[in-house]
Image (cartoon, grey):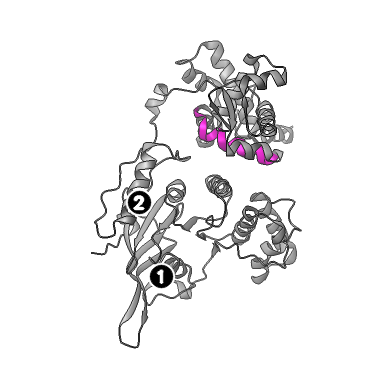
Amino acid sequence: MQETVTSSQASGAPAVVEAIIRAEKVEKFYAQPSQNRIQVISATDLEIVPGEILALLGPSGSGKSTMLRMLTGLSTPTAGQVYWHGQPIAQAEVNVSIVFQSFALFPWLTVLENVEAPLQARGVSSSERRERSLKMLDTVGLDGFESAYPKELSGGMRQRVGFARALVVEPEVLFMDEPFSALDVLTAENLRSELLELWSKKTMPTKAVFIVTHNIEEAVLLADRIVVLGRNPGHIRTNFRVQLPQPRDRKSESFTQLVDYIYKVLTRPDTEPAAVPEQQIGPRIRDQRQMRYQMLPHARPGGIAGLLELLLDKGGRDDIYRLADDLAFEIDDLLPIVDAAQLLGFLTIEEGDAAITPAGEQFANSEILRQKELFRNAAVENVLLLRQICRAVDTKSDHTVPEEFFLDLLDEQFSEEECLRQLETAVTWGRYAELFDFDAARRRFVLPDALGDEAEADEEAK
């Protein structure tokens, strides 16, 4: 039996939210001379609501791309209706953009001209489209490449141009059709992280994201809600919310369970899907004192970068004691830097050797701004204390948190002296990564630009 599920029926779904796009009993089929028909998608209900990333998974031939085209208005359903804010999509002014798998750039246009193209088609003045395009290129990390042509760019950079072009029109919904599948593993992983960062910081001028993918881990990593299609004809087999907090740990049991669940749904088309595995919502406030904080090694980001560059020169691997001799370091002076790089996921220790990881290699080979970004992502993913400070300053109404709050958390695990040293290292790392700043006069953690804003406000008051 085919199962049709709406977002209001999804596991753990919140109260009803007005949908941006709503598909009601949409079908796609093609008539045949024999009076039979080829059914691509059976009657299906689906909603795209504000504030969520929705991933659509399914085997080949399940109608994923067909569904995307119907939801965007590029294709008309054979039966049923698609609504844009309650109005039939054919009669509405739809504001969506699509990022394609194949980049789809104009090879005869520069990067800037490619991004300006949709604005030019909408009749935006040359000065405004240039300003908006330059701003968006800066947002996706392509500042300085405005005059380059697509053939001069790597695959990852070309896909960034695709993102910039899609976002420059400020779409209400951003559609992506397997946007990372043509990229190498490392580049795809970086772009996924950057997409999540833009989304979580609300840097993207969009209210919802709809991504078609065949990659199960990618869906669990990115999505707030996942819809899995079956085929012959295409129909929804399961539709559920992902309750795991961001950033998500691929190695966690709850992540692995969700991946296994989706895999079983995809590979057992004749079996009724089981219940969605219970997902961990994250630690409760009362559990904070029971957490084990990592001992932050007292190393500076510059020292970590220098160590990784040296390892690259040595082929990516070397004995730790030999490294210390080469640097004329005491082993006790080098170990904190090694430990810090290991904590961030930039190297591993194997039988006394330090071996650089792909993430560490990318960090060592990157320019300064990119290194900061990679350091920021690694710090938030791997260091509990930094993650907590970020969340605290972000959620507080005044975006400041007293130092004493974190000292109180740390003193269950460390001595008073070590608590202060831990926070000192946290401040160094947080400032470098531009995660937060520290107001030494008030002994408070603040958002990165808050100190400058306060000083400017004081100056204006004078």
According to the picture, the residue beneath numbered tag 2 turns out to be 263
For the point 72% across and 57% down, the residue is: 152
Can residue 444 be seen here?
no
Residues in magenta, as a range: 369-384
Residue 361, placed above or below residue 407: below
Of residues 126 and 114, the one nearer the viewer is 114
Name the amino acid, label 1. Answer: Val
- In the shown orientation, is residue 39 left or right of residue 337? left
Residue 373, placed above or below residue 34: above
Whole-percent x, y for residue 168 in the image: 63, 59
Single out the residue that lies furthest toward the bottom. Answer: 33
Q: Main secondary structure of the magenta part?
A: helix
Name the amino acid, label 2. Answer: Tyr
Residue 122, placed above or below residue 53: below
- In which quadrant will I find the C terminus? top right
Mark 2 lies on a secondary structure that is: helix
According to the picture, the residue beneath numbered tag 1 turns out to be 82
